Image (cartoon, rainbow, N blue to C red):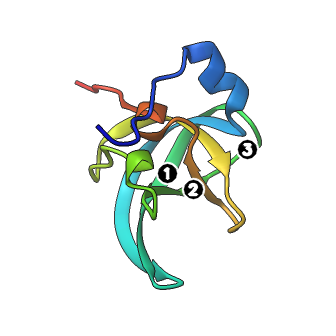
Amino acid sequence: MGNAVREYSLEQKVHLSDSVVIGRVVSVKKEPEGGAPSEYAHVQVDKVLKGPSLETIDVMTKGSISEMDLECCEVGKVYIFFLMKTKKNNTFMSVNGRYGVSLIPIR
């Protein structure tokens, strides 16, 4: 079965997060980083629930660890993100792989 990522409780996700935000994906970009391709969603932050005030962020959606890849981020859709900061400025990754980002259905 390989390396599976188990879903954390909501309390664990919040505790592990540097930032929890609600935001809309405005674009998706691919970026080769040291030979390993990565993908990022550029997110317009609508609401910060935890962490510093942010207007826009980049969220890694695909990286070198496939089990941590996200099953999101469609341009124009709104998501809640449970995130930890990376070494790159204003760049984050999910605290719980695909379970750290959830679609918020907007009618």
**Separation (CA) of disc 3 from disc 2:** 10 Å
Q: Which residue is mark 3?
A: 53
Q: Going from the N terminus, do you reach mark 1 or mark 3 first?
A: 1
Q: Is residue 31 above or below residue 55?
A: below
Give the amino acid type for the residue marked by disc 1 in the picture.
Answer: Gln
Q: Return the x and y of residue 53 as percentages of the image width and height.
A: 73, 44
Q: Quadrant of the C terminus?
A: top left
Q: Going from the N terminus, do you reach mark 2 or mark 1 first?
A: 1
Query: Is 31 placed left or right of 49 in the picture?
Result: left
Give the amino acid type for the residue marked by disc 2 in the picture.
Answer: Thr
| Mark 2 crowdedness (10 Å alpha carbons): few <14, some 14-19, many ≥20 | some
Q: Which residue is nearer to you in this view: 20 or 32?
A: 32
Q: Which residue is mark 1?
A: 44
Secondary structure category for the residue under label 2:
strand
Secondary structure category for the residue under label 1:
strand
Q: Which residue is nearer to you in this view: 40 or 69?
A: 69
The numbered disc on residue 56 is: 2
User: Image point 34% across, 42% down: which residue?
Assistant: 2
Give the amino acid type for the residue marked by disc 3 in the picture.
Answer: Ser
**Separation (CA) of disc 2 from disc 1:** 5 Å
In contact (CB < 8 Å): disc 2 and disc 1: yes
User: Image point 46% across, 85% down: which residue?
Assistant: 35
Q: Return the x and y of residue 59 as percentages of the image width and height.
A: 50, 55
User: Image point 77% across, 42% down: which residue?
Assistant: 52
Query: Is 32 placed left or right of 34 in the picture?
Result: left
**Separation (CA) of disc 1 from disc 3:** 12 Å
- Picture quadrant where residue 78 is located: top left
Q: Return the x and y of residue 33 as percentages of the image width and height.
A: 51, 80
Q: Quadrant of the N terminus?
A: top left
| Mark 3 crowdedness (10 Å alpha carbons): few <14, some 14-19, many ≥20 | few
